[in-house]
Image (cartoon, rainbow, N blue to C red):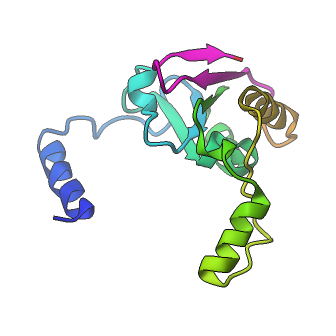
Amino acid sequence: MSVAQEIESANAAYAASFTKGDLQLPPKRKVAILTCMDARLDPAKALSLEEGDAHVIRNAGGRASDALRSIIISQQLLGTREIIVIHHTDCGMLTFSDGQLREQIRTQLNQDADHIAFLPFRDLRQSVLDDVRIIKESPLVLDVPVTGFVYEVESGRIVRV
């Protein structure tokens, strides 16, 4: 059975007892959480979030410049008034450079990816500070609280930066 088939089967069981179809469109807690797509981080479990509580925006590294479109929509159209940035230990974004990945793409796919900023980083704590700053300094983002954390994949804890 493929993973897609497994997911389809699991969803059928979930949908059979689903009772949350009447949740409101705006997130109840008025918060947008920007975090990494890493499979070891489950924001709902780690942060005790229920369906409808928050917008969870995920991308490789939890990078702000890649998420501004979603943050703006979250604020302007859906009323979020707080932003939380969460990066994590042992992140894959610490393991490569743009040049390395571009060369790999050239070699494996015979394609040019020079126009893409993959946004890796060398310092985990600094990456959180940089992304908080990008959000706070964007003229397209409302002046709201923006807090940064590092999620420890080893312990499940978040640590404020």
- Percent of width and height locating residue 26: 51, 35
- Percent of width and height locating residue 85: 65, 30
In terms of depth relative to the viewer, which is nearer, 61 or 146?
Answer: 61
- Percent of width and height locating residue 43: 46, 30
Q: Can residue 49 be seen in this view?
A: no
In terms of depth relative to the viewer, which is nearer, 107 or 157?
Answer: 107
Going by the image, does 3 lie left or right of 159?
A: left
- Report which quarter residue 4 is drawn in: bottom left
- Percent of width and height locating residue 45: 38, 25
View extreme (bottom): residue = 110
The C terminus: image quadrant: top right
Q: Residue at coordinates 69% horizontally, 78% vertically from top-left?
A: 106
Q: Residue at coordinates 72% horizontally, 46% vertically from top-left?
A: 68
Q: Residue at coordinates 76% horizontally, 34% vertically from top-left?
A: 127
Going by the image, does 71 lie left or right of 45?
A: right
Q: In this view, does 96 lie above or below 106?
A: above
Going by the image, does 4 lie left or right of 99?
A: left
The N terminus: image quadrant: bottom left
Q: How many labels does the image show?
A: 0
- Report which quarter residue 21 is drawn in: top left
Which residues make up the magenta segment? 143-160
Q: In this view, does 113 lie above or below 14?
A: below
Q: Is residue 44 above or below residue 117?
A: above
Q: In this view, does 118 lie above or below 23?
A: below
In terms of depth relative to the viewer, which is nearer, 58 or 126?
Answer: 126
Magenta residue check for 150: yes
Q: Is residue 82 visible?
A: yes
Magenta residue check for 35: no
In terms of depth relative to the viewer, which is nearer, 75 or 58?
Answer: 58
